[in-house]
Image (spheres, helix red, strand yellow):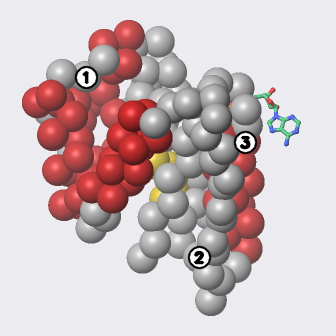
């Protein structure tokens, strides 16, 4: 299994569009894809897909459901863990909620988030106009 994080320090640069298109492209190569919409309080992916999942990340943060229970199967052959829309609390999770989410992702989907978080912290520390970040996308198709 491979996990790919798409992030940027700036809004409106095409993250959500890219994620959906990448998921569609990967499914054409018969890859099983699960999108986790990490824009927790302002759901993007479901809006762009024109769907309204019954359950979303709010139910996990509130402790009512686990991540696996909110997975939504789209008609496009990939799955989605939906974010919430207009839920301000989700934009500033407390440390217990962050740990709950991280633990569930690691446990339920067997992904290690530590490396991604380290990279994010590195760039946050060094955010500097003189720093040129060159994105590299490595995909291995089977
Ligand atoms: N490759 C592209 N060429 C032109 N327009 C694009 C491209 N990718 C995305 N857009 C347009 O740019 C706008 C922002 O795209 P998108 O919502 O995917 O960005 P985002 O980074 O997810 O934004 P946000 O930070 O608000 O979540 C949309 O109107 C989208 O249609
Ligand atoms: Mg977006």
* Label 2 neighbour load within 10 Å: few <14, some 14-19, many 20+: some
Q: Nearer the viewer, residue 51 or 122?
A: 122
Looking at the image, the residue that sits furthest to the front is 130
**Pair 2/1: label in front:** 1
- Identify the residue position indicated by label 3 in the image: 17
Label 3 near ligand 1 (CB < 8 Å): yes
* 84 relative to 95 in the view: left or right: right
Q: Secondary structure at mark 3?
A: helix
Label 2 near ligand 1 (CB < 8 Å): no
In this rendering, does residue 19 appear at all?
A: yes
Q: Relative to 104, does residue 27 appear above or below in the rendering?
A: below
The picture quadrant where one finds residue 41 is top left
Q: Quadrant of ligand 1?
A: top right
Q: Nearer the viewer, residue 60 or 127?
A: 127
Q: Position of residue 140 (x, y in %)?
A: 62, 81
* Label 3 neighbour load within 10 Å: few <14, some 14-19, many 20+: some
The picture quadrant where one finds residue 54 is top left
* 96 relative to 88 in the view: left or right: left
Q: Position of residue 84 (x, y in %)?
A: 43, 25
Q: Secondary structure at mark 2?
A: loop
Q: Nearer the viewer, residue 12 or 124?
A: 124
**Separation of disc 1 and disc 3 at Cα?**
25 Å
Q: Position of residue 106 (x, y in %)?
A: 23, 58
Circles 1 and 3, Cβ within 8 Å, touching? The answer is no
**Pair 2/3: label in front:** 3
Q: Residue at x 63, y 71 (%)?
A: 138
Q: Secondary structure at mark 1?
A: loop
In this rendering, does residue 64 appear at all?
A: no
- Ranked by sequence position, the earlier of labels 2 and 3 is 3
Circles 2 and 3, Cβ within 8 Å, touching? The answer is no
**Separation of disc 2 and disc 3 at Cα?**
19 Å
Res 31 label:
2
């Amino acid at each position: 299994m491979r996990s790919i994080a798409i992030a940027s320090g700036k809004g409106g640069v095409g993250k959500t569009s890219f994620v959906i298109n990448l998921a569609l492209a990967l499914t054409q190569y018969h890859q099983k894809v699960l999108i986790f919409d990490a824009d927790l309080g302002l759901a993007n992916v479901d809006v762009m897909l024109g769907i309204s999942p019954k359950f979303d990340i709010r139910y996990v943060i509130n402790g009512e459901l686990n991540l696996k229970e909110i997975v939504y199967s789209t008609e496009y052959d990939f799955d989605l863990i939906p974010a919430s829309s207009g839920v301000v609390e989700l934009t500033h999770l407390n440390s217990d909620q962050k740990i709950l989410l991280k633990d569930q992702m690691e446990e339920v989907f067997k992904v290690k988030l530590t490396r991604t978080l380290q990279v994010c912290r590195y760039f946050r520390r060094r955010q500097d106009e003189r720093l040129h970040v060159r994105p590299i996308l490595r995909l291995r198709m089977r």
